[in-house]
Image (cartoon, helix red, strand yellow):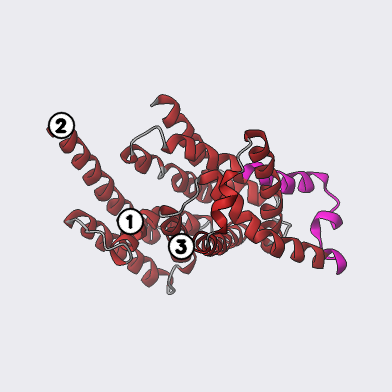
Amino acid sequence: MRSGILSAALAFLCWGLFPIYFHAIGEVPPAQILAHRVLWSLGFLLIVLAFRRQWKWLAQVRQPRVFWSFVASAFLLSANWLAYIWAVNNGHVIEASLGYFINPLVNIMFGFLVLKERMRPAQWGAIAIAALGVAWLTWQAGSVPWIALFLAASFSGYGLLRKTAALGALEGLSFETMVLFPFAAAYVAWLTVNGGNVFLEVDSDTTRVLLVAAGPITAIPLLLFATGARKIPLSILGLLQYLSPTIQFLLGVWLFQEHFSSDRLVGFAMIWAALALFAGEGLWRNRTASAKT
């Protein structure tokens, strides 16, 4: 249990600190960061797979259903990555954190709409309160928080596809990066031919090192998460997941000095209240079920 909690907490801590990493390579266009993230992630993952001699799963991806489901999840993941990178490097860290705060509630809605899962009254209440929070933020800003909603929807859609996937976390991410590799490699080759490849043109060796580091920076938190998820109850995992957007939110306010008015705080407070209701009801049900057994 302790090692599982530590692994999961470290994964969410890493994801929470991502804005610092992306700000450090802010001179690189988001599309190029995404391409390098795919290229170096695949390289790192292939090393891990070779070390573990874990190749039997490749036979499974020959099945059309498995293959196309991971093609879809790969493009959803890349869209989520690109939107997040753009948001961080354009001063929208707080709104990006909002997307991951509401992500669990979007997961519930997808479960209800797609998987036909039954929703409990408290879950309906949490979604209603969160919707009011988003409506308040929209009214105050004069525009819909599209970044947050896109991040939440794309990651929930990705989670929905991975929920019924035939491959585990390591194998699944490896195949997703394999799917994206030809597009990333072709894009980097085109940039190189046209003199726009920042990796070659930039004067800073630090930037090059950070781009290469995108491989382990992407893969290690996922492996930690997969390890922790197998060892701890979903209720604890569900609570730990709020560590990541909380850190992102605090970085946006304190480190990056993004504007955060009292009116905006009201909308966030509604969403935090919705999450508190959602998490509290889940913990209460788990304790009740444990007491009965």
User: Which residue is the site of mark 1?
Assistant: 271
- The quadrant of the picture occupied by the C terminus is top left
User: Which residue is the site of mark 3?
Assistant: 148
User: Which residue is the site of mark 2?
Assistant: 293
Number of numbered tags placed on the structure image: 3
Q: Is residue 163 left or right of residue 205?
A: left
At label 3, counting other C-alpha atoms closer than 10 Å, the crowd grade (few under 14, some 14-19, many 20 or more) is many
The span picked out in magenta is 192-217
Calculate the distance from the C-alpha at mark 3 to the C-alpha at mark 1. Answer: 12 Å
Tell me if residue 27 comes above or below residue 240 in the rendering.
Answer: below
Tell me if residue 220 comes above or below residue 145 in the rendering.
Answer: above
Looking at the picture, how far across and down is residue 63, in whole percent? 53, 59
Q: Residue at the spot x=64%, y=51% of the render? A: 22
Tell me if residue 177 comes above or below residue 54 in the rendering.
Answer: below
Looking at the picture, how far across and down is residue 25, in whole percent? 70, 51
Q: Main structural element of the magenta stretch: helix, strand or loop?
A: helix
Whether residue 205 appears in this view of the structure is: yes
At label 2, counting other C-alpha atoms closer than 10 Å, the crowd grade (few under 14, some 14-19, many 20 or more) is few
Q: Amino acid at mark 3?
A: Ala
Looking at the picture, how far across and down is residue 247, in whole percent? 48, 44
Upstream in sequence: badge 3 or badge 2: 3
- The quadrant of the picture occupied by the N terminus is top left
